[in-house]
Image (tube, rainbow, N blue to C red):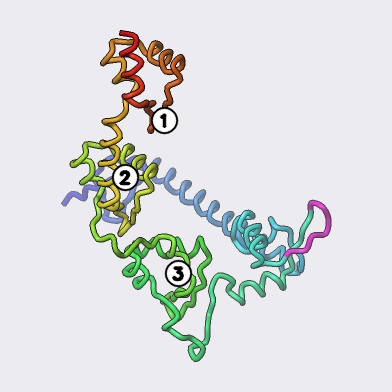
Amino acid sequence: MEVRKICQWCGKPFIAQKTTTCYCSHQCSNLGYKDRIRERKRQLKRSQELLQPRQAAEGQDFFSFAQAAKLMGVTRQYIYKLVKESKLRASRISGKKSLIRRADIELMMKTKPYERIMPKENFDITEYYTAEEIADKYKVNAKWVWTYTRQHKVPKVRIRQFNYYSKKHINAAFAKYEVDSDLTEWYTPEEIQEKYGMTRVAIRSQVYRNNIPSKKEHGQIFYSKLHFDLSKSSEQESKAEYYTVKEAMEKFNLSRDSVYGILQFHQINREKNGRFVRFLKVEFDKVMGVRK
């Protein structure tokens, strides 16, 4: 019976004499053995490098930021962050030198600075939301709640594996996102694109210029149907009363410079509407009638 195997060193197929054979030749076996020895030495060196700072720091009571980072197994930037947030105390001994006491590191680890634990007898669950309750009430993603509360330092209580967030702080944080309850009809951007033939950029510009109420639910943006329709209707009404430079050029067969020259010479008021310059048709028609 032939035992077909793949050499673990060179990757070539070969017929092995025993089921335990891993290499196709004596040369591959030697190379594989040497590689295993080198890997063991590398692992031993890495473990020694990890243990060395701790062994060296056994009788040490004060550490630099770099030494504290090695001792705790974190980056130096993280130590700076802990000190900046007053989670870890550091003593400045000169203009460029600060030291951290071992006792302060141990105290920080005991107090768990990023976790607020409240005794069960003092915990009123009615004053707190769960992440799921926040997501359901404010129509957001539950994963986003964790990121938002951490960035804005919303107080939380952890009981077993569950987080509870302060209702007062959450309600205050989301107050700016609340919309008028009387608004019941909303457009999605896709519906506006289909109805008015506008691009996404044009929609955002229209919303910004006309201060149209919007809301976001589960990652989907909505715009007030009433306000958007009113802004478009008023825009169409005003469009009937104004020329743009391009419209004046086409109607009177003028160059762009000629249009601007007429506006300046006859002191016709003009205004900027988005990226277009417009002016009253009555005033421009009057000037063009005089010229004729």
Q: Main secondary structure of the magenta part?
A: loop
State the extent of the magenta-drawn residues as a range.
Answer: 90-96
Q: Is residue 184 left or right of residue 142?
A: left
Q: Is residue 27 visible?
A: yes
Residue type at the position of mark 3: Ile
Dot 2: what SS?
Answer: loop
Which residue is denoted by mark 3 in the rendering?
170
Query: Real-space Cα distance between discs 3 and 1?
Result: 41 Å
Which residue is denoted by mark 1 in the rendering?
272
Where residue 141 sits, quadrant-wise, is: bottom left
Q: Residue at x 42, y 83 (%)?
A: 126
Q: Residue at x 29, y 32 (%)?
A: 239
Dot 1: what SS?
Answer: strand
- Tell me if mark 1 has few (under 14), some (14-19) or many (20+) residues whose alpha carbon lies within 10 angstroms of its own: few
Figure check: 53 above or below 243: below
Disc with the residue nearer the chain's start (3 vs 2): 2
Which residue is denoted by mark 2 in the rendering?
7
Where in the figure is residue 201, as x and y percent of width and height? 33, 38
